[in-house]
Structure formats: structure tokens, C-alpha cells
């Protein structure tokens, strides 16, 4: 049974942070550390009570142990200062079923607690009549914490039992040491007992000063008595000192953290549930609008708070089945049919409304980026002071508009109106001219929605309702929110500053009025928006014309959306400048061996050229990707580098090294390429985080295997020189581009149905009671259909519950048979 772990966390704000700078408050930033992911928030300058409001989702199939938040004081010159940290173990997060949402005090950073990595050892207890001894083969270690200024360590291992100890040799300048040494302890000298423990400690050797602690492993002697030979990888643990929160003197962070951990059954167990969901949308002609279906039952048993997650999951399921268009048509038809007042159409948080929102994000995000990103970037670059509200105009914040002195309030207002009109005109022109760029699936869904609304509200006075239904999703729930908060739609890496944020808010308000076709202008409290009313009213005709062209599409021309893909293979998922390592030619300094190139990533290729306009491109196929991983800083003396390992047709492995401008961009590229290649076969289980220089790897100092093919790699993957660290191919950032995973999505739906199984059982009972009474034949037939649907769904849920119970019982039995976690 597979395991699916997702971690959702939001860094809200900080308070009472200590000042680190002499002349001014510290500019704090947040560094989130969860090996193998590091993420950095924006720096808030000169503020000891900063607000970040940044949130992330991380998918980790392998699970995790600890999530740590470091608050840093950014320094322009020299290294950043550490203010404090907050460490949350997986157990602490998992104990909060609804998630953790609290203020937490920062603790001091203790070097003895900052450990990471694993050690590979084999322990064997030998017992003879005359002698008892312990033999420990210390093979290797990986991903050790860097303790030296070069980003490496000089590790050695020490084994201790009672008053006995032995040490390995010191391996210098590596975080991936390979010893392959055997140490022995004579237990007769220490007094043989099953009560003690064997301790393995890893240290960083220092010529001057004391050695630095890198981690330890404790193995009870009782385990060795039961299993004389114990071998495997063991996670290094800290000394176990209690964390000191300094009585709140280091300040506090407000964090929101939630762990979602699911155990996924094999696909065949979910097929009955998928079949029921598919039946609900492929045969709408056979049932009436008010008929009970699994989708209506699912909406009944879910809360409003969870409806957005359920809507996104359903959209992904139907995308994978190639049925997202009939699925949305089914929901929208029910929603329209049950609406009597056109003014309330799609105004609630119904499953139909949420499904349409999530569908727009899943299928239309690349389209949104193509239309809005150049304009948003321009607004961020200009940083104009714009304000229309007389109560908020601050004359000290605006630049001089004339040579007569400080600008007046009227001048500021006139300048703001002109800038907003220019920005709004640019946005509207980009949208109106984007009909051909809009994904075909979105256009067909809107066409069917237009038809359903027109059928329900055919009266002349409701002529605009069919336009409002579409524009409500297109403008009010998609484009306007993207303008308001570009970071949440991945249009920018960080939130806007106060000045730019106000400009975006005013533009979003104006675009919402455009989406409402100007029908509510002059009726609200914000009369200071009146100078924009003329341009909004002038846009109404062009918006209606745009919507007419948008739905002017042949339904039969829509190809089924490919399974496990929400966008066309030819569409660019991510693009931008990266530094590419120049593998050929003389390289006097490794850091200067990188050349600037422009990269494009689609679901089929990773290509690059000298500039975006360059006609000749080089490319590698996504299908050939075997690993996408970070590169250690000491490999090329550069930060934020990654490697893309590929396999050519002859089976040879090749590596492309790339450098990003910051750690966040590195995470985004790693995640994007991993998602594009997540279904590739023959992904490598291990890799070298260093580079090969001077006939050895910089990471583990082992010699190279020249001419190694992928097939040889798999046959000899236990060799030390072939990959000294584990790959993390499935560790990705969660966003709109997440690959479809039918089993995980079906598991999410099952969990919601399981929580509402009593309600489903009540439906079955109520329908049966109605059917037993004397009712008309049509009503009786309908009740029987209701009962059959509810009973089938309930049986599917109970079958899945039994399957989970059976698999969990087997897992417990297997866990009990293990001596020690490895």
C-alpha cells in the first residue's frame, strides 16, 4: 500500500523579534528547512513585527521527520545572522487533526541539535565459549550537516559501549564519507549485558578547537541478542538537549501547519468508486435533473469548508477520465435548474461554483500567465503611487508631479486616474485579443453554460444573465483575484509591497465592475471610483463581443483531455533564464564555467537557446530524464545549482548542470521538471550531489565509473561510487500543475464519503420507508432508483473501508516483525 504525504504550511507573521543591527531594526526573513527542501520568504526590511502571509504545499511520498523554520537577519555584507528557530516534529503536527494554528516562541539554535543525514553500518554480535565481541562495519554516511566554512565536513565515526570505544579514520572535506572499516569491541572487558546500548557517533574533526557533533545512533543490545547481524541505513539523531525558548526573548512566529497523510490502495480497489462517478455524467439523458447521484450525495455529506478541496479532486478525476466537460455541464445544469432568481446564480459556495473555479485554475493557468504576466511585471517594476480614495491620499508618499513644489491632492488623483486607465486599457486589450489562446475545454464549458442559462432565463429582461454567468467565473473568480494577489497565482515570486498592492487592489475592483458589465456602478459606497466608470462602461460592448467569440466553438472539435495532463504537450509550463554549465573547453575557475541561456519546459522537452528570440534551440526529451536533483555548493563554488540526469538511446547517462538566481527559483524548476517526468520509467534511486573533477566526485571523493550505462547502474547500484545520496524525484511543490494521480484522488473522495457514511445510510433508510408506503408508480420508481444509487455508493465505501483495515493489519504485523527501523 503506497503512502501519500502532503504538508501545508503558512508563515503568517512575527512579533517582538530582537534587533540584530546597531543602527536600525533587523530586516527579518524566514528560511524553511525540510531536507531535501529549503525555501526562503521575502525579506521585510526594518521591521521587528513583520508580516509575510506566505503559504506552501509540499508533496513528500517518502514522509519526513522534522519541519524547521529559521528566522534570519539579512545582512548586505557578510553572512546573515540567525535570530532563532522553531522545529516541529511530524508527530506534533499529526496530533492536530485540523492543523496547527498558533503563536510559537523562537528557540536558540544549538549546533549539537542541527544534525541531518544517515549512516550505513553492519553490526554483528559474536559469542564463543571463551570470548564475546561486537564487530561493527562502518560502511558510509550521506547528507551529513556541513560544519566547515567550505560547506563540507571532516567526518569520523566513533562506536561506544559502556567504557569501551573505537574510531574510524577521518575523511576530509566531504558530507558523503566512505569508510568501509571494521571496528571491534571486546564485550568481556565491559561486562556483557542485554540492558545497555551501543552508540554510534559521527563527528566533524577540527584541527583547532573541539570537534563538532554530526549525529548519533543508539542500538539496544537486546536487539543484537535477538538478531546477531543487524545491517542497514540509520537516521542520525541529535544529542537530545531540550530546546530553550529563551522565555520569549527571541520573539515568536504565527504558523499554520497541516499534515495530510494517506495510505493509497492498489488501483483496482478504487475502480468501483470511479465507475459510479463516471456513470453520473455519461448518461444524463437517462436521469432527471433532481435524481439522486453519487455527486449529489457527495455534496450533501461535505462541509462548505472542505468543498473547495473536493471540487479540485473531482476536476482532476474527470480530467483523467477525459470527462471534465460533461462533469461540469452536469453540475452547472443542476445549479441553473435550481436557481429561480437570476441575481443569485452561482453566488453560493456550491459544488458547481467551486468546481468551475478549480477547473479554471487547473486548465487555464498557463493561459492566464500568457495574458497577465507581462502587465503584472510592468506594474511591479514601475511602483507608481496610485490612490483615488481622498481619505487615503498621502502627499508625502508621492513624487513631485510639477516644479511648483509638493503635488496637491487633485494632482495626485488626476495622475492616479490616468495611470489606472492606462493599466486597465492594457489589461482589457490583452484579454479581448486572447480568444485564440484560451484553452478549448474552457471555451466549450462556457458555451454549454451559456446554453443552460439561456434555456432557464429566456425572458428579454434577463438578456445579460448568460453573459454574467460566464464573466462571473472568467473575470470575478479568475482574472480579478490573479491581479489582486499575483503570488497566489504564481505570477510573482513574492507578495507586492504596500504601494503596488494598493494599485493592484484598485485594478481588481475595476475589473470586477467590468465583469459585472457595469450594472452596479454608482450603487456602492466607493463613489471615489467614479472617474473610472466611463472607461468601464465603454468596455461592456467589447466584453460581450469577446464572450460571444469565446463560445463560438464547435463542441465536436474538443479532443478528450489526455489522461494525467491538464494542458497540451506543446504548452510551455515554465520558462526563464538559467546559467548552464559549459562542459567543454578549458575551465580555469569552475564558477565561470556557466553561461546564461533561456530555457523552456513543456511536458515533452526541456529546450534552451542564447536568447528568447533565438531561432536555433537545443533540447532534451522529458522521457529521457532519470533524475532532477540539487548540486552541492562546493561542486562549482556556486549556490542554487541543480542537475538534470538523462539517458541517451545507447543507455549512457549524461548530466546537465544548471544554476538558478535564488533558492526559490531553484525549488520551482526542480518541482516543475520532476512533475513533468514523474511517470518516467527507470528513474535513478541514487545520485551524486557533487561534480566529477580530477577523477573523483567532489561529494563522496570516490572514483568515477566511466562509460557507465543505465542498465549497469541498476545492476551495480549498491556500489559506493554510484550515487552517494538518495534521489527525491517525487518531492515537489504543490500547485496548479500537480500531475493527476487517480488513486490518490479517489482516496480523497473515499475519505469524505466515509465521514458521511451515516448520512448515506439514512438516505437509504428514508427512501426505503417512502417506497414501502402507498405512492404513485412514477414516484415509487424514482424512490427505487434513489435507493439503488445510495446503496451502491454505501457498499463501495464499506468495501474500501474493509480493504484499508486489512492492509493496515498486514502492515502492523510486518512492523512488529522488524527489530529496528532502518
Image: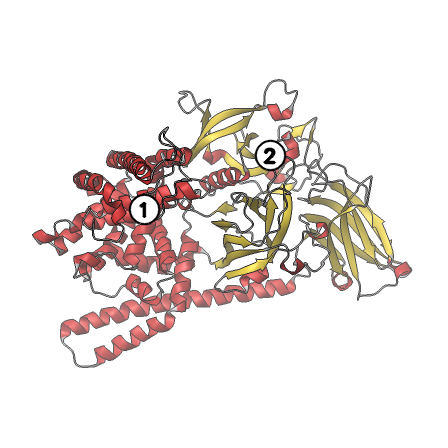
x%, y% of residue 479? 31, 44
Residue farthest to the bottom, as pictured: 773
Q: Quadrant of the C terminus?
A: bottom right
Residue 24, picture quadrant: top right
> Residue at point 87% right, 59% down?
128
Q: Which mark is residue 639?
A: 2
Q: Nearer the viewer, residue 363 or 374?
A: 374
> Residue at point 51% right, 25% down?
596
x%, y% of residue 152? 70, 38
**In this picture, is 279 found above or below 203?**
below
x%, y% of residue 360? 32, 46
Tell me which colouring the rendered structure shows: secondary structure
- Asked if disc 2 and disc 1 are in contact, CB closer than 8 Å, the reply is no
> Residue at point 49% right, 34% down?
624
Can residue 804 be seen in this snapshot?
Answer: yes
Residue denoted by label 1: 389
Can residue 445 be seen in this snapshot?
Answer: no
Q: Nearer the viewer, residue 157 or 453?
A: 453
Amino acid at each position: 500500500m503506497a503512502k501519500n504525504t502532503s504538508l501545508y504550511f503558512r508563515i503568517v507573521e512575527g512579533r517582538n523579534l530582537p534587533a540584530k543591527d546597531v543602527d536600525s531594526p533587523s530586516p527579518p526573513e524566514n528560511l524553511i528547512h525540510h531536507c531535501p527542501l529549503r525555501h526562503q520568504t521575502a525579506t521585510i526590511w526594518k521591521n521587528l513585527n513583520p508580516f509575510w502571509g506566505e503559504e506552501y504545499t509540499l508533496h513528500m511520498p517518502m514522509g519526513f521527520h522534522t519541519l524547521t523554520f529559521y528566522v534570519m537577519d539579512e545582512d548586505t555584507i557578510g553572512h546573515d545572522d540567525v535570530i532563532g528557530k522553531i522545529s516541529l516534529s511530524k508527530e506534533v503536527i499529526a496530533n492536530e487533526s485540523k492543523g496547527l494554528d498558533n503563536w510559537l516562541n523562537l528557540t536558540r539554535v544549538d549546533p549539537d541539535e542541527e544534525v541531518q543525514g544517515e549512516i550505513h553500518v553492519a553490526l554483528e554480535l559474536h559469542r564463543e565459549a571463551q570470548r564475546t565481541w561486537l564487530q561493527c562495519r562502518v560502511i558510509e554516511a550521506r547528507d551529513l550537516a556541513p560544519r566547515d566554512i567550505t560547506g563540507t565536513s571532516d567526518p569520523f565515526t566513533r562506536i561506544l559501549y559502556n567504557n569501551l570505544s573505537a574510531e574510524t579514520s577521518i575523511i576530509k572535506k566531504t558530507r558523503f564519507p566512505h569508510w568501509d572499516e571494521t571496528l571491534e569491541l571486546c564485550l568481556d572487558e565491559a561486562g556483557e549485558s542485554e540492558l545497555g546500548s551501543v552508540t554510534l557517533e559521527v563527528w566533524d574533526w577540527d584541527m583547532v578547537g573541539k570537534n563538532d557533533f554530526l549525529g548519533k545512533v543508539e542500538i539496544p543490545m537486546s536487539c543484537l541478542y535477538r538478531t546477531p547481524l543487524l545491517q542497514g541505513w540509520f537516521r542520525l539523531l541529535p544529542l537530545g538537549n531540550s530546546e530553550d525558548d529563551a522565555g520569549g526573548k527571541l520573539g515568536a512566529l504565527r504558523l499554520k501547519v497541516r499534515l495530510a497523510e494517506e495510505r493509497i490502495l492498489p488501483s483496482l480497489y478504487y475502480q468501483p468508486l470511479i465507475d459510479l462517478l463516471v456513470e453520473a455524467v455519461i448518461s444524463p439523458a437517462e436521469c432527471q435533473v433532481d435524481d439522486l447521484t453519487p455527486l449529489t450525495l457527495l455534496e450533501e455529506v461535505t462541509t462548505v469548508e472542505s468543498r473547495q478541496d473536493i471540487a479540485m479532486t473531482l476536476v482532476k478525476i474527470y480530467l483523467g477520465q477525459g470527462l471534465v466537460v460533461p462533469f461540469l455541464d452536469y453540475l452547472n445544469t443542476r445549479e441553473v435548474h435550481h436557481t429561480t432568481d437570476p441575481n443569485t446564480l452561482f453566488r453560493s459556495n456550491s459544488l458547481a461554483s467551486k468546481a468551475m473555479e478549480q477547473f479554471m485554475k487547473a486548465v487555464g493557468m498557463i493561459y492566464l500567465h500568457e495574458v497577465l504576466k507581462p502587465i503584472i511585471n510592468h506594474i511591479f517594476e514601475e511602483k507608481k503611487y496610485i490612490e483615488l480614495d481622498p481619505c487615503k491620499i498621502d502627499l508625502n508618499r508621492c513624487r513631485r508631479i510639477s516644479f511648483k513644489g509638493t503635488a496637491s491632492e487633485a494632482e495626485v488623483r488626476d495622475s492616479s486616474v490616468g495611470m489606472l486607465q492606462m493599466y486597465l486599457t492594457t489589461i482589457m486589450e490583452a484579454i479581448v485579443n486572447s480568444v485564440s489562446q484560451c484553452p478549448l475545454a474552457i471555451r466549450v464549458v462556457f458555451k454549454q453554460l451559456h446554453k443552460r442559462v439561456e434555456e432557464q432565463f429566456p425572458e428579454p429582461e434577463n438578456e445579460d444573465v448568460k453573459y454574467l454567468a460566464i464573466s462571473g467565473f472568467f473575470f470575478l473568480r479568475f482574472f480579478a483575484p490573479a491581479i489582486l494577489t499575483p503570488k497566489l497565482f504564481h505570477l510573482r515570486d513574492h507578495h507586492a509591497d504596500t504601494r503596488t498592492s494598493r494599485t493592484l487592489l484598485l485594478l481588481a475592483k475595476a475589473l470586477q465592475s467590468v465583469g459585472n458589465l457595469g450594472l452596479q456602478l454608482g450603487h456602492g459606497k466607493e463613489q471615489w471610483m467614479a472617474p473610472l466608470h466611463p472607461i468601464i462602461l465603454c468596455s461592456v460592448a467589447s466584453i460581450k463581443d469577446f464572450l460571444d467569440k469565446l463560445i463560438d466553438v464547435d463542441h465536436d472539435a474538443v479532443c478528450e483531455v489526455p489522461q494525467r495532463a491538464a494542458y497540451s504537450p506543446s504548452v510551455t509550463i515554465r520558462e526563464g533564464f538559467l546559467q548552464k554549465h559549459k562542459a567543454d573547453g578549458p575551465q580555469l575557475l569552475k564558477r565561470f564555467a556557466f553561461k546564461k541561456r533561456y530555457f523552456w519546459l513543456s511536458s515533452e522537452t526541456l529546450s534552451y537557446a542564447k536568447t528568447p528570440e533565438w531561432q536555433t534551440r537545443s533540447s532534451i526529451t522529458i522521457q529521457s530524464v532519470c533524475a532532477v536533483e540539487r548540486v552541492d555548493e562546493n561542486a562549482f563554488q556556486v549556490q542554487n545549482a541543480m542537475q538534470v540526469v538523462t539517458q541517451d538511446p545507447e543507455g549512457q547517462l549524461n548530466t546537465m548542470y544548471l544554476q538558478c538566481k535564488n533558492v526559490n527559483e531553484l525549488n520551482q524548476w526542480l518541482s516543475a521538471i520532476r512533475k513533468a517526468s514523474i511517470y518516467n520509467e527507470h528513474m535513478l534511486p541514487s545520485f551524486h550531489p557533487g561534480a566529477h573533477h580530477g577523477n573523483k566526485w567532489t561529494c563522496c571523493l570516490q572514483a568515477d565509473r566511466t562509460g557507465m550505462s543505465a542498465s549497469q547502474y541498476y545492476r551495480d547500484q549498491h556500489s559506493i561510487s554510484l550515487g552517494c545520496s538518495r534521489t527525491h524525484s517525487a518531492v515537489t511543490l504543490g500547485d496548479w500543475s500537480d500531475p493527476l494521480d487517480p488513486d490518490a484522488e479517489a482516496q480523497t473522495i473515499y475519505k469524505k464519503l466515509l465521514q458521511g457514511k451515516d448520512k448515506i445510510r439514512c438516505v437509504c433508510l428514508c427512501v426505503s420507508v417512502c417506497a414501502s408506503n402507498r405512492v404513485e408508480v412514477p414516484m415509487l420508481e424514482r424512490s427505487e432508483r434513489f435507493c439503488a444509487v445510495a446503496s451502491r455508493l454505501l457498499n463501495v465505501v464499506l468495501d474500501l473501508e474493509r480493504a484499508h483495515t486489512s492492509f493496515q493489519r498486514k502492515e502492523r504485523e510486518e512492523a512488529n516483525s522488524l527489530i529496528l527501523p532502518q
